[in-house]
């Protein structure tokens, strides 16, 4: 648009969709590819009337530095993909943009005490041992203390075995929501016949509370319920992964209000599959 205003003869239409003039709002917020990226990656629905400056102002006011970093990451990848489409005729779709964001290595902040193991928690999803099923779980807090839960279960080859969501549940804090999500998914996993399970969370508070095991609070009451499920399994472990390594469960939790109470067997909702593919590629063993 700036070039057109300077009387430079260029096509003002979006080179991706060709439906509207390519403004900063259209490219990053309104084009169907961009809208799909925001929804699938972060569960964000963009209002068509949102100005880019207002969007960024709201993002920068977020207290979660990981969210700010992910938004900046997405904007960079959208711009990069647009230029490759325009100048190199490379395919431009939301799955490729999201896969690209997974390669840039944003590190989620954690608050563990110095020297403790989770501070060096993995930043990407990793495959479990051959005989173990990894179940990633996450919770998302909304208004009125309503939380949504999500999980994705995969085997040692990275193949999806099950995925599910639950909404709504009432939780007094995000950590309580994470614990309630763990309790829910442990029960679901036992019903699905999983016997050797590695549950994985991006909640550092939940991880430490699980390791501690006892205490006097609502959180430890929920953890005690989780412990009561241990007899249903032959092996159980809880591991910590940084948030970008929990992207699939995060997607299920963030969209739980629209996915509702559904369990998918060996499949999941359409928006999940590009995230599964990104995890699969990131977890390929390195040959020495």
Image (cartoon, rainbow, N blue to C red):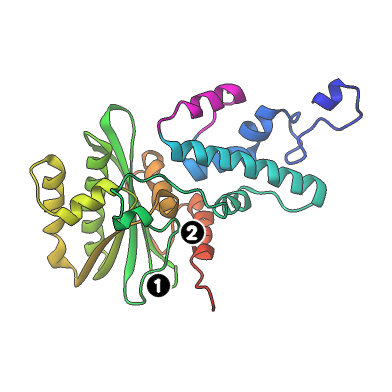
9 inside magenta stretch: no
Secondary element under disc 1, as helix, strand or loop, is: loop
Which residue is tagged 1?
156
Judged left or right of residue 111, residue 270 is right
Instruction: Write down the residue under mark 2.
Output: 276
Q: Which residues are magenta?
A: 45-63
Residue that sits furthest to the front in the current view: 114
| Residue 36 can be seen in this image | no
Q: Position of residue 42 (x, y in %)?
A: 48, 41
Residue at the spot x=32%, y=55% of the render? 118
Rendered view: 242 above or below 197: above
Q: CA distance from mark 1 to mark 2?
A: 13 Å
On the picture, is 240 further left or further right than 55? Answer: left
User: Whole-percent x and y of residue 34?
Assistant: 62, 39
Label 2: how many residues lie within 10 Å, few (<14), some (14-19) or many (20+)? many
Q: Residue at x 41, y 58 (%)?
A: 122
User: Camera-side residue: 204 or 221?
Assistant: 204
Q: Quick check: 14 above or below 203?
A: above
Where residue 287 appears, x then y in whole percent? 54, 77
Say whether residue 216 is left or right of residue 133.
Answer: left
Kindly indicate the quadrant of the structure image that contains residue 19.
Answer: top right
Decide if residue 147 is in sight here: yes
Structural crowding at the residue carrying mark 1, measured as other residues with C-alpha within 10 Å and reported as few (<14), some (14–19) or many (≥20): some
Residue drawn at the location 26% of the way across and 48% of the way down: 181
Front one among 246 and 35: 246
| Residue projecting furthest to the left | 216
Q: In the rendered image, which quarter contains the N terminus?
A: top right
């Amino acid at each position: 648009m700036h070039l057109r205003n300077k009387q430079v003869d260029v096509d003002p239409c979006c080179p991706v969709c060709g439906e509207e003039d390519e403004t900063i709002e259209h490219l990053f917020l309104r084009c169907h590819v961009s809208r799909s990226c925001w929804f699938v990656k972060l569960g964000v629905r963009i209002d068509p009337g949102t100005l880019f400056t207002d969007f960024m102002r709201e993002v920068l006011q977020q207290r979660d530095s990981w969210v700010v970093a992910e938004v900046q990451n997405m904007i960079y990848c959208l711009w990069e993909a647009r230029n490759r489409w325009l100048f190199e005729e490379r395919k431009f779709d939301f799955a490729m943009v999201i896969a690209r964001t997974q390669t840039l290595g944003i590190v989620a902040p954690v608050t563990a005490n110095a020297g403790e193991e989770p501070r060096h928690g993995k930043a990407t999803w990793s495959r479990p041992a051959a005989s173990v099923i990894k179940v990633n779980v996450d919770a998302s807090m909304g208004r009125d203390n309503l939380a949504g839960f999500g999980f994705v279960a995969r085997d040692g080859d990275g193949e999806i075995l099950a995925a599910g969501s639950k909404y709504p549940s009432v939780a007094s804090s995000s950590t309580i929501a994470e614990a309630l999500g763990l309790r829910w998914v442990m029960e679901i996993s036992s019903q699905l016949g999983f016997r050797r399970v590695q549950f994985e969370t991006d909640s550092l508070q939940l991880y430490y509370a699980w390791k501690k095991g006892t205490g006097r609070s609502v959180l430890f009451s929920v953890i005690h319920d989780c412990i009561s499920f241990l007899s249903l399994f032959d092996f159980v472990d809880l591991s910590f992964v940084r948030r970008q390594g929990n992207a699939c469960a995060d997607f299920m939790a963030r969209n739980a209000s629209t996915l509702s109470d559904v369990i998918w067997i060996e499949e999941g909702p359409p928006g999940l599959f590009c995230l599964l593919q990104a995890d699969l590629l990131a977890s390929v063993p390195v040959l020495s």
